Image: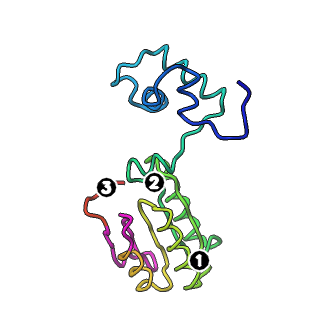
Amino acid sequence: MPRTTRKATIYDIARLSGASPSTVSAALGESWRTRRIAESTVETIRRIAVEQGYSANMQARGLRKARSGLVGMVIPLHDNRFFSSMSQSFEAFARERGLVPVIASSLREPEEERRIVETLISYAVDYLFIAGATDPDAVSRMCKAATCGISSWICRGGVRLRWYPTITRARPI
């Protein structure tokens, strides 16, 4: 079947493979062994998925798992040696844990800092770290008001000022 401009879905893969959407989902994920799906079926489904250019819909997965897999960091400047080193360490730390880091610079502008935090919260980041906050009180109010279940850390001058758990259960990083 020639590939169209529309993104392939698990329903397309199911139709082409003769399997159910549930089986396709398990075969493309990690649960196919526990569901006792034959390895040959998994290979067929995965081959068709590659042929069709299938990629998982991470937003849909995030809704099902109530986790986005995103972790945000707001720093004042990228070109500062201290914050540059901190963001590189943060990125490596996040990736080691299977998270996708999103790092943004506020340019030491309080309004930009609030806009970035608002945007990251709207993307339902699982964790939010703010280093060198220009307006920690305003940012902390935003984090406390967030109902998306993030944990946030506000830091200034390399010292953790506050931790704002806005979740009811702890999630280890």
- Residue 153 falls within the magenta-colored stretch: yes
- Give the residue number, with chain letter if any, for mark 3: 171
Which segment did they paint magenta?
Answer: 146-166
Considering only vertical position in the picture, is 39 above or below 173? above
- Name the mark nearer the viewer: 2 or 3: 2
- Quadrant showing the C terminus: bottom left
Q: Which mark is residue 68?
A: 2
Q: Nearer the viewer, residue 86 or 75?
A: 75
When asked about the image quadrant of residue 80, the answer is bottom right
* Model colouring: rainbow
| Residue type for callout 2 | Ser
Q: Which quadrant is home to the N terminus?
A: top right
Residue 117 in picture, x, y percent from top left: 50, 73
Say if mark 1 contacts mark 3, CB within 8 Å.
no
Q: Nearer the viewer, residue 149 or 63?
A: 63
Residue at the location (49% across, 13% down)?
Answer: 40
Q: Main secondary structure of the magenta part?
A: strand
Residue positioned 62% across, 70% down in the render? 78
Q: Label 2: state its secondary structure.
A: loop
- Choose the circle earlier in sequence order: 1 or 3: 1
**Residue 147 place in picture, x, y as percent:** 36, 69
- Give the crowd class for mark 1: few <14, some 14-19, many >=20 residues within 10 Å: many
Compared across the picture, whether 66 is left or right of 28 comes to left
Three-letter amino acid code at the position of disc 1? Ser
Please tell me how many numbered marks the rendered image carries. 3
> Residue type at mark 3?
Arg
Identify the mark at residue 106; answer none if there is no mark. Answer: 1
* Distance between the alpha carbons at the discs numbered 1 and 3: 27 Å
Q: Is residue 90 magenta?
A: no
